[in-house]
Each structure stands twice: as C-alpha cells, then as structure tokens.
Image (tube, rainbow, N blue to C red):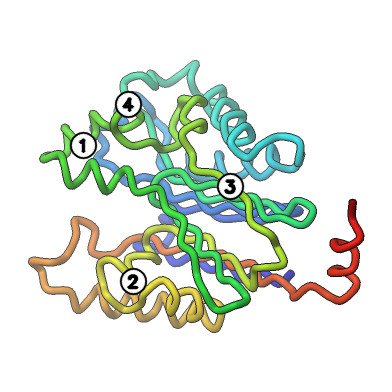
Amino acid sequence: MHITSLSDPAVPGADEDAAGVLGEVAVVLDGAGVPARFRAGCRHGVAWFSHSLAARLLARAQDPAVPLAGALAAAIGEVRSLHEHECDLEAGGPSATVAAVRRTGTHLEHLVLCDASLLLEHRDGSVVRLTDRRIEEVVRRERGAEAIEACRNAPGGFWVARHEPATADEALTGRVPLADLAAVHLLSDGVTRAVELLGLHDDVSLARALSADPRAVISSIRRAEDALDPERAPRKRHDDATSLTLHLRAPTTGDRASRTNRP
C-alpha cells in the first residue's frame, strides 16, 4: 500500500484539519469552524480538538475486534476526559467531522460522520462517494446560524464528533472487498468543494486527479476560490483542504487462490 497525504490550511499555521495513518487505520478529521459563541463553554481551540481526537481514534481503532464506531465513541470519551473538569461542555465546545477506514483481512471497513467524505475508487473505473448528507438537509431547511446550531447532535438534525460519545452511533459505516478497490481517498470538505461549490470535477474525475497529483488538485481549488463571484462565495472563501489517499495493490494470483480455497 502506498500512502499520499496533503493538507493545505486556509490560514497558514492554523490548520483545523487532522489526518493520519497508523497500522491498518487511516483517518481525516475536519474541525468545525463554527462561530466562537457556539463553543463558548470550552477554552480549547478547534485544531486542538480535531488533532487530539484523530490521535486517539487511530489508537483505539487498532483492535479489529472493536467496530470503528466503537473506537470513535471511546476516542470521544477520552478527549472529553481531558478537559471536562475545566470546561463547561454543555455550554458548547469544539467539534469535528470524521472519515476513517481500516483494512481488516480481505475487506476495507469505513466510517463517515458529517460532511467529511470517502471516495472509493474501484478497479473497474467506477467511483463511489460516501458522505453523510444530513447537514445539507438541515442547511436547506433552516434559516439562520442559531437554528442550524440547534440541530447539531439532535434528533432530526445532523451529527458531528463533539463531547458526546453516543454520537458515534450515528456514523455511517460499512465494508467493501479490498480486491475491488484501486484506491480510497479520505477528504475534508475543503477538497470536495471542488465538486459542489467550484464545479471543477465530478466524483470520478476528482478521484482520478487525486490519485495522480493531489497538490495540483488543491492548487486548482485555491485558484477557483480566488475567482469566485462575491455573490457565490461562501462565508469562508478558503477552507482547510486535506486529502489522504491509500493506493491499494492489485491482488496477486496467490491472493485470489487463498480467497478461493478459504472455507
């Protein structure tokens, strides 16, 4: 397996995304850059939260007997224990979206929570995108930041990793055969805006471009963000952009025989 990882912060030195690989596990977390009033109960920054949670999720997910959602719940609980004694988390704290994968035997397990994404690039040339779309539904339905915030980690709303371990149960999870995959891309929404906001790619062309040259992809995103009409520009014209790609080797004849002969 060959790994390519690139993170380009919107503001130099202030990257709220976190990415990492440990053993058979890879994660990308996107710290939620919500207005400070919605995390006023905590003195810790968004980058501290996303990086602390990423490290603990990587460690907790090493045991293949523990489901990825269980590993995420345990990691959230660990990070909560670091600061609940000094922060009023019920008054609002930092949060993050999550994309995670784990190679286990002949399969790739995957998890997404909120609008971080996975692009599963198959050997037949097809690409499957996995994204939790519930936040988009809330944004379409609600008006105003307060109304949207009230839907965070609430029934009928959307779910992110924050200080509540139970939110991990809301993550979208599954598994696919490794033999079917050429690559898997873990992305923050600063990269997938190349599809939704900027119209530079569709999912298939984005996956292929990331496999070829992620640096060129992010450079094209930055140029397109700069060229946006002010009326179309989002609140954050530039966003932290993180891509982590696992290039998976093709199965050998021995691999195929092993799977065929397995009872």
The percent coordinates of residue 247 (x first, y second) are 66, 72
Q: Residue at x 71, y 34 (%)?
A: 66
User: Earlier along the polypeptide chain: callout 2 or callout 1?
Assistant: 1
User: Earlier along the polypeptide chain: callout 2 or callout 3?
Assistant: 3
Q: Secondary structure at mark 4?
A: loop
Of 4 and 178, which appears nearest the observer?
Answer: 178
Above or below: residue 158 compared with residue 247: above
The reply, left or right, for residue 239 in relation to residue 185 is: left
Q: Quadrant of residue 225?
A: bottom left
Of 13 and 67, which appears nearest the observer?
Answer: 67
Check if mark 4's residue and mark 1's residue have beta carbons within 8 Å: no
Spatial distance from mark 1 to mark 3, Cα to Cα? 28 Å
Quadrant of the image containing the N terminus: bottom right
Q: Which amino acid does the dot numbered 4 rest on?
A: Pro
Spatial distance from mark 2 to mark 4, Cα to Cα? 30 Å
The residue at which mark 3 appears reads as 174
Q: Secondary structure at mark 3?
A: strand
The residue at which mark 4 appears reads as 155
Q: Secondary structure at mark 1?
A: helix
